[in-house]
Image (tube, rainbow, N blue to C red):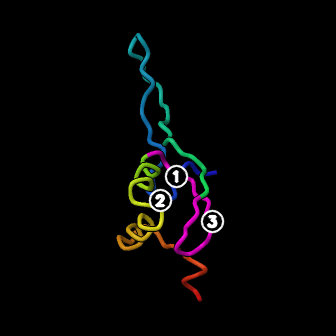
């Protein structure tokens, strides 16, 4: 399972563990991801997304449908809806 946010595209980055003696060894910083189901009332469907905490805060502010449409308009994601096909 890839550790990538479905909406923001956040992914792991690399850095160093730095010990008390200042030795450095490689490590990875993982994004804070949550698997969450969202109901979209405009299309009357449930979707499951793996989203970061930052994306969850934005969804709480704008709403899931408005946020997806904003990302679609920017060209970051492609959202396929069953209701749009009708």
> Which residue is nearer to you in this view: 69 or 50?
69
Badge 2 or badge 3: first in the primary sequence: 2
Give the labeled residue for mark 2. 7
Which of the 4 image quadrants contains residue 71? bottom left
Circle nearer the viewer, 3 or 1: 3
Q: Along the line of sight, which residue is nearer the eye, 69 or 76?
A: 69
Residue at position x 59%, y 89% from top? 86
In the picture, the disc for residue 51 is: 1
Assess disc 3: are there few (<14), some (14-19) or many (≥20) residues with their C-alpha within 10 Å of its C-alpha.
few
Name the residue that disc number 3 marks: 46
Is residue 62 shown in magenta? no
* Magenta-tinted stretch: 38-53
Query: What secondary structure predominates along the stretch shown in magenta?
Result: strand
What is the C-alpha distance between the residues marked 3 and 1?
A: 15 Å
Residue plotted at (47% across, 45% down): 53
In this view of the protein, which residue sits in the foreground, 2 or 58? 58
Mark 2 is surrounded, within 10 Å at the Cα level, by few (under 14), some (14 to 19) or many (20 or more) other residues, namely some
Q: Tell me which label, 2 or 1, sits earlier in the chain.
A: 2
The residue shown at (42%, 20%) is: 18
Q: Residues within 10 Å of mark 1 (few under 14, many from 20)?
A: many
Residues at marks 2 and 1, CA–CA distance in whole angstroms: 6 Å
Badges 3 and 1: C-beta atoms under 8 Å apart?
Answer: no
């Amino acid at each position: 399972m890839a550790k990538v946010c479905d909406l923001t595209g956040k992914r792991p980055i690399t850095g160093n563990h730095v010990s008390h003696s200042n030795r450095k060894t490689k490590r990875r910083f993982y994004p804070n991801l949550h698997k969450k189901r969202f109901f979209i009332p405009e299309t009357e469907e449930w979707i499951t997304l793996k989203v970061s905490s930052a994306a969850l805060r934005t969804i709480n502010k704008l709403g899931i449908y408005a946020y997806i449409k904003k990302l679609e308009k920017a060209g970051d994601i492609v959202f396929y809806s069953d209701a749009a096909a009708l």
